[in-house]
Amino acid sequence: MASAVARPDVRPANPQFSTGPCTKRPGWSLAALSGALVGRSHRAREPKARLAEVIERSHAILGIPAGWRLGIVPASDTGAVELALWSLLGPRPVDVLAFESFSQSWATDIVKQLKLPAVRLLEAPYGRLPDLAQVAPDHDVVLAWNGTTSGVRVPHGDWIAPDRQGLVIADATSAAFAMKLPWDRLDVVTWSWQKVLGGEGAHGMLALSPRAAERLATHKPAWPMPKIFRLTSGGKLTEGIFAGETINTPSLLCAEDALDGLRWAERIGGLPALIARSEANLAAIADWVAQRDWIDFLAEAPETRSSTSICLKLTAPWFTALDADGQAKAAKQFTALLEREGVALDIGSYRDAPPGLRIWGGATVETDDIVALLPWLDWAHAQLMPAAAAA
């Protein structure tokens, strides 16, 4: 049965399909970092201007509305989300949409660490979204706009009340620069450099609406605030954070890399081009999946399929007949085959997700490489199938 699928002749030019850190933009090399202001103080005029440039270019490319503040914060997207949770929550009840690993983490922090008294967990299993109609407009809302570990995205913002009283806090780390975000329905949006534009890790971005900024200035949390979470001083917003004055020391090498990704995005046509590249990657995989009976999307509703963290589940009878340990082992064998062949690196599903594949389809991934990868998935499946049947 293994011989039924021939070994493909064409390999992806770039086998890097990791969901984070993600592959660099096409044509990237270390020369892109030659102008980095390494060895300089981030507080000096020129380095601070570079950090401000990251903010300004991000603001422009994403189409963030006027009046919003955008700053660079510590600890990647995780730090940005935690900063928002610890700084803003408390005055209102909270609805947490928990449908994959990271959104479950935010729920755990809100319930067990902040110990807020009025929290509703609106949960759904991997592959689905919670019932968005249950969200209360007078509650604060915390969600992942794109489930990085489930491949499920929120398809639109129509379910968010335009006259809401609560704040909507959206972890958009694998959505920003690849999906159109409804800024008029959101209040806090976070992401990191190492996702759609292929930047380096450790730095997060925090975007605040005027409503969120007002909450920050008027709400004093009931718990102690670590220094790296403090956005206010004397009851006023620390405006310098949103002009390149970071809370802690940033990497100017990483900042230069972030600028390189932003400039590339501008060269190819900005946000519309970035979205189109990501959607083309999803479309290539969707066309291929539609012609196979052994694999499917983890996202059950087509309109919720992520175009970045594209998660697939094996549905072949030989695989579904295995117990949980057997499925996990088979999925690892599948990805190990591809890695040994040098055609796909780091495409195993997230450790807490159902066993399967997770292929990054963000804007830095070339659709030609996705197309070249897909026959290798057929080949790997054929190699494993007889071994499983024999067992």
Image (cartoon, rainbow, N blue to C red):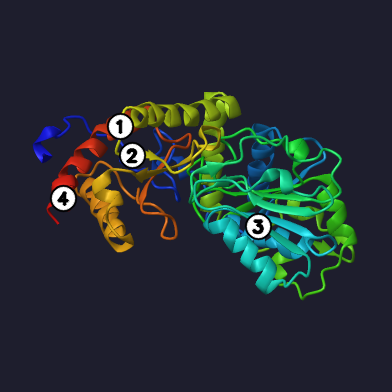
Residue identifier under label 2: 295
x and y percentages locating residue 385 in the rendered image = 18, 46
Relative to 12, 296 lies left or right: right
Mark sitting earlier along the chain (1/3): 3
Q: Dot 2: what SS?
A: strand
x and y percentages locating residue 86 in the rendered image = 73, 65
- The kind of residue on which mark 3 rests is Val
- The kind of residue on which mark 4 rests is Ala
Q: Does the residue at mark 1 contact the one at mark 2 (Cβ under 8 Å)?
A: yes
Residue identifier under label 3: 81
Query: Nearest the camera: 261 or 206?
Result: 206
In front: mark 1 or mark 4? 4
x and y percentages locating residue 25 in the rendered image = 44, 36
Query: What is the number of the mark on residue 23?
Result: none
Q: Dot 3: what SS?
A: helix
Residue identifier under label 4: 389
Q: Does the residue at mark 2 contact the one at mark 3 (Cβ under 8 Å)?
A: no
Residue drawn where x is 42% and y is 55% of the image: 350
**What is the C-alpha distance between the residues marked 2 and 3?**
33 Å
10 Å crowding of disc 3: few (<14), some (14-19), many (20+):
many
Residue identifier under label 1: 292
Q: Does the residue at mark 4 contact the one at mark 3 (Cβ under 8 Å)?
A: no
